[in-house]
Every structure is written in C-alpha cells, then in structure tokens.
Image (spheres, rainbow, N blue to C red):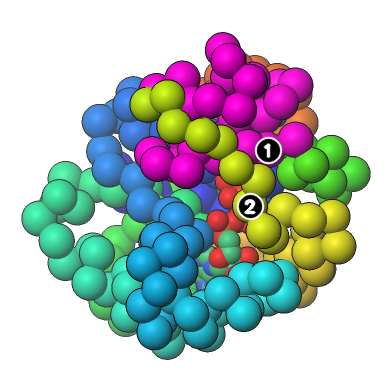
Amino acid sequence: MKLILLGAPGAGKGTQSAKISEKWNIPAVSTGDMLRAAVKEGTEQGLSAKAYMDAGKLVPDEVVIGIIKEYLSSDKCKNGFILDGFPRSIPQAEALDAMGVKIDAVLSIEVEDEKIIERMSGRRICSSCGASYHVVYNPPKKADVCDACSSALYIRDDDAAETVIKRLNTYHEITEPLKGYYEKKGILVCAKGMEKVEDTTANVFEALEKVEA
Ligand code: AP5
C-alpha cells in the first residue's frame, strides 16, 4: 500500500501512522520528523527550516520535495510506504505526481480545531526515539519518561499555543485544498479522529480495509 496521511496539525497522523505501519508492515516517514532531525543535527537545511517551523509556516516546497525524492528512491519503499505530512501543498502533490509515484489512497483524519488546541498542549515527545504521548489521552507509564526507550520526554517548540493557531491557519489555507485535489482523482478516504486513540484507529483501519478490498 502506498498511502498519504492528511490532517491538521495534531490530528493524530503520527499516532495512526505507527499503527498502520505495524498492521500493514510498511515503513512510515514523517517530513516533520526528518526536519526536526536536521534541526537537531544543526545542518544548514535544519537551521533554515527551524525558522519556518517555529513561525508555524511551511518549509519551502523545494527543500521538502528534495528530501522525499531521496527517501522514495530507497529500497525500503519498494513494497509500499506511508507519507505522514507530505504533500502539504498543491505544488508538492504535483511534484509527487511528476516523480511517477502511484498512490493507492489518501487518508484524511478529521478533527475539529478546538480539539487540536487541547491535544497539542498535552503532547510530549521522546527525545531519543520520537515516540509521541499525551499527558491525559496517551500517558507514558512513568511521567516524562519514554515507555519504549526510557529517554526523557520534551515539549515541541511549535506546540506553543500561539504557534499551533498559526499552524492551523497554514493547514486550512495551503494543505486542506489537497482534499479536493485527491478527491478528484478518486483516492481520498476520510476517518473521524475526534474520539479516543483506539476509536480513531478502528475508523482508520475500516477505511483502509475498504481500499484494499
Ligand atoms: P509535523 O511534525 O508533520 O507536524 P504536523 O503536521 O503539524 O502534525 P503533528 O506532528 O503536530 O501532529 P500529528 O497529526 O502527527 O498528531 P500526533 O499523532 O502527534 O510538521 C511540523 C512542521 O514541519 C510543519 O509545521 C512545517 O513547518 C514543517 N513541515 C513538515 N512537513 C512539511 C511539508 N511537507 N512541507 C513543508 N513544511 C513541512 O497527535 C497529537 C497529540 O494528540 C499527541 O499527544 C497524541 O498522543 C494525541 N492524540 C492523537 N490522537 C488522539 C486521539 N484520537 N485522542 C486523543 N489524543 C490523541
């Protein structure tokens, strides 16, 4: 399966892509995670990306398209993949088409803005393996410690409330039109993401099983 995950910041793309990856045994890649890794390494690309990310804006298309092109040409993608957070603009979607990549489904996880703001304030991320938690909805067994690798959890810089509002505006203005783009191609499927993590997973699996059938 070659799958794109769409959804507002905090809709649960990362959470659900881990579940899909496990069930369908396909690799998941998040452009956000790749950019954060570049920021952490202090590369030139990372340093220039950080300013856009902290401002709640999209990193320029050419940077992200370059990263994805390289990733998709790797061997691990030959039996399928999940793209979490790419494409995020019409030019990025057109670039993906131009690479000759045939996508099976585009899954949009639907969550209202009010819920997003509440979720982002409680998100915690593992500083080592990147696992994502929520202090109320998906808490680690021990506060501020990753269940998987025992590293410390941190709060993402762009999860500050004022940045989340900017990211939501960017989503509605630039990314949400992709739903129409993929609906026209007949490959858009939607799953409700407002309820608990496991309920969203059930909605996501049901939508994807229909695609497979
Ligand atoms: P990125 O890291 O992709 O951020 P995002 O799309 O804003 O999405 P998030 O990672 O914030 O949220 P998510 O949907 O994965 O939700 P999660 O599962 O963590 O991108 C960051 C930045 O990088 C962008 O702003 C941009 O600057 C840049 N960038 C990235 N890709 C780019 C591109 N293609 N082009 C240009 N720029 C790009 O869940 C959120 C929280 O809610 C967690 O705490 C989780 O535990 C909890 N939760 C999840 N589901 C539920 C549920 N059902 N009920 C209760 N809680 C839940």
Magenta region, residue range: 122-148
Q: Quadrant of residue 204?
A: top right
* Side of 71 relative to 119 (left or right): left
In terms of secondary structure, where does tag 1 sit? strand
Q: Residue furthest right?
A: 114
Residue that numbered label 2 is attached to: 156
Q: Mark 2 and mark 1 in contact (Cβ < 8 Å)?
A: yes
Query: In the drawing, what numbered circle is on residue 123?
Result: 1
Could you tell me which quadrant the N terminus lies in?
top left
Task: Give x and y (percent) for residue 161.
Answer: 84, 55
**Is any part of residue 165 visible from this angle?**
no
Q: Residues within 10 Å of mark 2 (few under 14, many from 20)?
A: some
Residue at figure coordinates x 37%, y 26% from the top left: 149
Residue at figure coordinates x 58%, y 15% from the top left: 142
Q: Quadrant of residue 174?
A: bottom right
Residue 133 lies in the magenta-colored region: yes
Say which amino acid is labelled 2: Arg
